[in-house]
Image: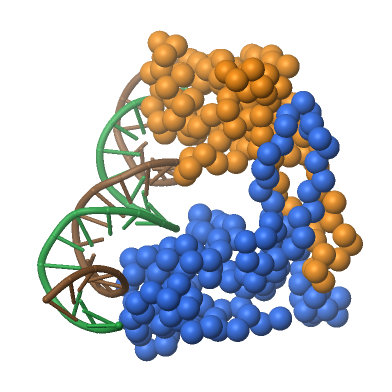
Chain colours: A blue, B orange, C green, D brown
Amino acid sequence: VPIPCDDARRAFGDARVSSQRRAIVEAACTLRGAFTVEELTEATRSRDVSAGTATVYRAVGALEASGWLEQVGKRGESALYARCDAGSRHHHHVVCERCGRVEATECPVRVSPADGGFVVTRHEVTLYGLCPACMQHHEQGA
Amino acid sequence: VPIPCDDARRAFGDARVSSQRRAIVEAACTLRGAFTVEELTEATRSRDVSAGTATVYRAVGALEASGWLEQVGKRGESALYARCDAGSRHHHHVVCERCGRVEATECPVRVSPADGGFVVTRHEVTLYGLCPACMQHHEQGA
DNA sequence: GTGTATGCAAACTGTTTGCATGGAC
DNA sequence: GTCCATGCAAACAGTTTGCATACAC
């Protein structure tokens, strides 16, 4: 289920768009699965556009604010980002541990009304596993 | 349900124990709920023992390795630690958002066998809410 | 006496920010 | 022409590490 690459202007919430920001959006669309800011920077540079680290960080911040990108966890110390079509609905993410692909998923949390005496108001959840494609490879012993 | 303060030697897995490490263990026992390394360092210093930052970090690492401490999430950029009596059983944590108290909790995740086509093998969960005491205060308008 | 813990300061990582400049509209 | 985006380098926070010294056993 590839997410289409909207035009960069819309991605930034109809704000002003530079060539760097356009390249950043395009690069993000070519990356399957979740990526770090560093990976996005490299992907942008391999599109003949030089974008400084600070610029990419600022662009990612703007894209996150506009809802076009979402932080979907961490890999080591680095934040992981991915496009996500779930919009603002309550959802979580499944991350493929082999290829990094990320999908939105239903909320799998079923809390009893007063868990251990606590009133639970909020939760953070990330699921990890294998996506269908990687599962096939795995079953075939590849 | 206060967690008793074992002696420092046992906390470190029966290893050699210095006055700093003893003070760190005692300080950790006085802190209710989850704390950062910085908070633990301050608590240790207010016990008339000076312990350098690096020392506390190394001690926390050792205590985590021995299972006496557990990382229970993050607050901002800082790792949060807490004692936890759940041992090595599969469990998660409920964090009180008002007082920081942390309890182990049953796993609230119910994943369908193949969630969105993914085979889920692992998950990370943290619950947030109000502990019984803080809930009372809240209801009384305090 | 041996070996590990300590302290300090320097290194390190990911990320943010100040400031002068260039580009979008 | 006005503002915002850029780039660079410096600043930053939390954490780790190198190394000589001090202490537990």
Using the rendered image of the protein, determine whether residue A125 is visible from the camera's viewpoint. yes
Q: Residue furthest bottom?
A: A48
Q: Residue furthest right?
A: B113
Q: Is residue A95 left or right of residue B120?
A: left
Q: Is residue B47 left or right of residue C19?
A: right
> Is residue B78 shown above or below A69?
above
Q: Position of residue B135 (x, y in %)?
A: 67, 24
**Between residues D21 and A118, which one lies in front from this camera angle?**
A118
> Is residue A4 shown above or below A76?
below
Residue that appears at 58% across and 25% down? B99
Residue that appears at 51% across and 20% down? B24
Q: Is residue A107 left or right of residue D24?
A: right
Q: Position of residue B29 (x, y in %)?
A: 59, 17
Q: Is residue A95 left or right of residue A66?
A: right
Q: Quadrant of residue A61?
A: bottom left
Q: Position of residue D20 (x, y in %)?
A: 29, 33
The N terminus of chain B - image quarter: top right
Q: Quadrant of residue D14?
A: top left
> Is residue A51 shown above or below B137?
below
**Between residues B70 and A12, which one lies in front from this camera angle?**
A12
The C terminus of chain B - image quarter: top right
Say how many tags the image has.
0
Residue that appears at 51% across and 54% down? A77
Using the rendered image of the protein, determine whether residue B122 is visible from the camera's viewpoint. no
Q: Quadrant of residue D2?
A: bottom left
Q: Position of residue A58 (x, y in %)?
A: 37, 65
Residue that appears at 77% across and 39% down? B91
**Between residues D23 and B32, which one lies in front from this camera angle?**
B32
> Is residue B54 shown above or below B99?
below
